[in-house]
Image (tube, rainbow, N blue to C red):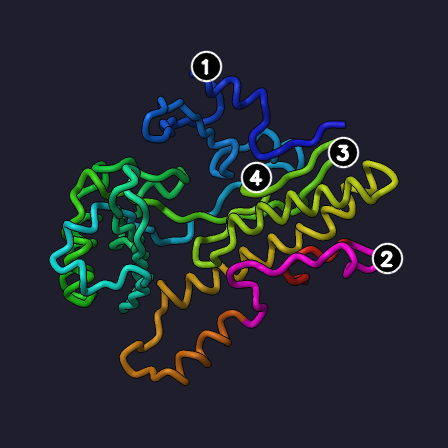
Amino acid sequence: MKIVRPCCTAVTRRVVKDRPSRTRSTWYTIGTPGRPGRRKYACSECTGRSPSVVRAAACGAVRPEYAGYTAWRGAFPVDRLTAPGRWPEDECAYVVFPGGHLIVYRIPDGSGRGQNANWVLYTTPPPGHDPAPDSPVSLPPGTAPAPLREHLAYVAEELLPPYWGDLVRLTTREELILQPLYDFTAERYTAPGMALTGDAATVARPHTGAGAVKALQDATALEAALSGAPTLSAALAAYDADRASVGRTMVTLGRRLGRELVERTPPWRSMDGAGLETWWRGLDGSGAFGGRRLEAAGDRPAAGPLKYGGTQSG
């Protein structure tokens, strides 16, 4: 029996040895104070952003679809902010503006002694300046084209509140990462002897807040299917019936959120609290935002597909 996880051994081996392959690769070093770091590799076979060998074998050619807008990302020491104390340490800021939104929160700086201001800003590029829409990879720090940087400067100066506009402007060019957004979901999660999980099966837009949750639930559901079914084929059928629909739900939600939070934003200034609440309920009618709770084993029906997380979509 071959259980295929998002990163299969053969592909990982090719990437680690830096041999030419169909995957792109990157590396980073992790470690703790007093202990040497060790090099880790991530290959795009794991991320759903390349022509996955495993996914192609399971369900044919499925390519990520460009969303039509991007995510700018940056991080720098909190002390660089003009007035760090104005931003409470336990507060995640969600800043909306016409044509997009900004999310800001603190993260450890890696030294164990301080914090970084980590931010992501969603906005639509100027006409004619979409960043490589046929290549679903982020642009490395410092490489974003000038027209896109100029558009980001316009958003910071004209559309964001001054404090948060300063946060974007204080981010150096070398700290800026530009991420074109893509999504996709496999039509089916299994094929004979194979199963897709995590980003190898579905990549939803980040607005759903559920990518990691869904990946963990995929693994849990696959384990339950393999443990509870009489045959491998029955286990894969149960897993596919359970999780493929969840992937479709997440992608649909991500696209709906993207339309309303980036592409056709509401008149924020005229909305009161009640109006905002009504608007949000209309967006997330499925209740899938942030992922859904996994049912305990005792809650599952005796027959039929496993009901692990998410709603069934037609």
The amino acid at mark 2 is Ala
Which numbered disc flags the more N-terminal residue, 3 or 2? 3
Work out whether 207 lies above or below 189: below
The amino acid at mark 1 is Lys
Which numbered disc flags the more N-terminal residue, 4 or 1? 1
Whether residue 267 sits left or right of residue 214 in the image: it is: left
In the rendered image, residue 65 lying in the magenta stretch gets the answer no
Whether residue 79 sits left or right of residue 266 in the image: it is: left
Q: Nearer the viewer, residue 128 or 307?
A: 307
Residue 260 x/y as whole percent: 41, 68
Residue position for label 2: 302
Query: For numbered disc 1, what is the local secondary structure?
Result: loop
**What residue span does the magenta drawing correspond to?**
285-305
Residue position for label 4: 200
Number of other residues with Cα within 10 Å of mark 2, as a class: few under 14, some 14 to 19, many 20 or more: few
The amino acid at mark 3 is Pro
Whether residue 149 sits left or right of residue 60 in the image: it is: left
Q: CA distance from mark 2 to mark 1?
A: 47 Å
Contact, mark 4 vs mark 3 (Cβ under 8 Å)? no
The amino acid at mark 4 is Ala
Which numbered disc flags the more N-terminal residue, 4 or 3? 3
